[in-house]
Amino acid sequence: MDRVLVVDDEPNIRESFARVLVREGYEVITAERGETAIDVVADSPPDVIVMDIHLPGLDGMETYKRLKTTHPRLPVIIMTGYGTTDLAIQATQLGAVDYQLKPFSPGAMLESIRHALADARLMQRTVALDPEGISTSTDAIIGQSAAMQAVYKDIGRVADTLATVLIRGETGTGKELVARAIYQYSARAAGPLVTVNCVAIPEGLLESELFGHERGAFTGATGRRIGRFEQAHGGTLFLDEVGDLPTATQAKLLRALQERAFERVGGGETIRVDVRVIAATNRDLEEAIAVGAFRTDLYHRLNVVAIHLPPLRQRREDIPRLVGYFMQRSAAKLPAPVPPIADDARTALNSYPWPGNVRELEHCIERLVIYTRGRSVQLEDVTKALQRPTGAMSTTATAEEPLRETIERYLQSPIGPNAHMQMIETVDRLLVEVALRLHDGNQTQAARALGLTRATLWSKVKRYGLGRGSEEPSAGVGG
Ligand SMILES: Nc1ncnc2c1ncn2[C@@H]1O[C@H](COP(=O)(O)OP(=O)(O)OP(=O)(O)O)[C@@H](O)[C@H]1O
Ligand SMILES: [Mg+2]
């Protein structure tokens, strides 16, 4: 259970927090003064702290600074009333993960807490490189194939430099694990690791997320905001899914990488930061460049040091070790005994193509441990555990009947020589058109829904004239 320390001198704030957080499954500790908070943390550090920046006695800013010195990786969310926003901003510049203006909505605060905990976990849980024993408190990168040993060498080679690293590989190959390992083995391991998932943030908000904004920079920008680049000062910034950045943001990122300088959105002041950048993508960047969705100069800037994670089907010798690893971890989690595996079941696991790579294998093993509860794993269990969620397939099946009727009518009417191509193109266009409509024109989300790369989607948008007159592949409105 995650423990939240709430520091506020107003009893009603402490009480309402306790009520909301306990309902969400958190354990809550409260303190009304900075001094008490420092004692509580020294005694037994919580997982996250939510504190008012305005406190009686030792003031919030001083309390924050002391906590930061003794517990640099402990996430702190600042609460602030009107009039003390400047202090809250200073605290974020010093590494506080977020600030919330009072009165805030419980939803926004919970979201902020969840985000802070997720980031902190990435920082705090260590990643071991193919260790002997298996522990449940550390994560590990498993694999002794030549390809994985090359990856470990790369990690060792780049970790201690300040070089920008680009981690590439299909989905589920362990890019995030590798990013965490680089951070942990780097000279900056004591500093913050700040993560931005470029695909999860609406396009319209990405620039402000990365670089911050000034008050009034756009509708809704009610105060200054410190971006992730600034928060990561002195530490490491992990740009996940960097291949999905809209081209406009790519230009700003390029400059930030080249000069370690940028302006907040709507601001004139040049901010200089000392940040080590690790980026990851599962996109085919060369293809994205070819269709104009990714900048060549940014590609070269990122690609100086690249680590390639091979798909699992190209390092099958790692499968047995991974199976053993996930069996032990899943069994420990339940808890349940580690089941023995029948020979034909083992062969099936070893020869399956694993299109979803290690993540798919991990989920498959979790299901097997749950199905079998200690009895041995049989071939049927593996077959069952490998069946993909049937939701999407049955929806295609329901779409088939009306489509069949439409095609029958189409072929019975007088048509030209390109009947086949015309119909294919109509369906192709409609898929893109409807996906865009369902996602309010946001191309990143539409591409995701269709399982296409943004670059491919963009080429279709252009081909079918579905854009909004914009030449940029970033026509989405976002938030
Ligand atoms: N070599 C490995 N050893 C052990 N676990 C692994 C390995 N590779 C991946 N995993 C596990 O598989 C899951 C997916 O890994 P991760 O999130 O790092 O993949 P990713 O490459 O970032 O995927 P995506 O492109 O979809 O974001 C995680 O649970 C991770 O711990
Ligand atoms: Mg990932």
Image (cartoon, rainbow, N blue to C red):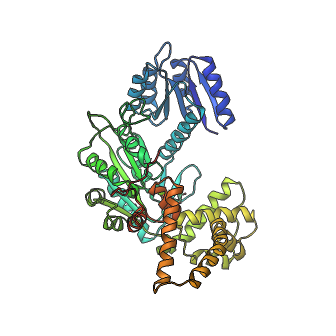
Seen from the viewer's position, the closer of residues 162 and 432 is: 432
Residue 346 image-quadrant placement: bottom right
The quadrant of the image that shows the N terminus is top right
Would residue 190 be found to the left or right of residue 362 on screen? Answer: left
Q: Is residue 295 visible?
A: yes
Rendered location of residue 195, percent (x, y): 44, 46
Rendered location of residue 192, percent (x, y): 41, 40
Would residue 441 be found to the left or right of residue 410 on screen? Answer: left
Seen from the viewer's position, the closer of residues 52 and 313 is: 52
Q: Is residue 420 above or below residue 323?
A: below
- Which residue extends farthest top? 57
Q: Is residue 10 above or below residue 269?
A: above
Rendered location of residue 473, percent (x, y): 37, 58
Seen from the viewer's position, the closer of residues 216 and 264 is: 216
- Which residue extends farthest left? 259
Q: Is residue 162 visible?
A: no
- Which residue extends farthest bottom? 417
Give the residue displayed 24% in from the left and 48% down from the top.
258
Would residue 170 be found to the left or right of residue 363 on screen? Answer: left
Rendered location of residue 438, percent (x, y): 54, 56
Label tally: 0
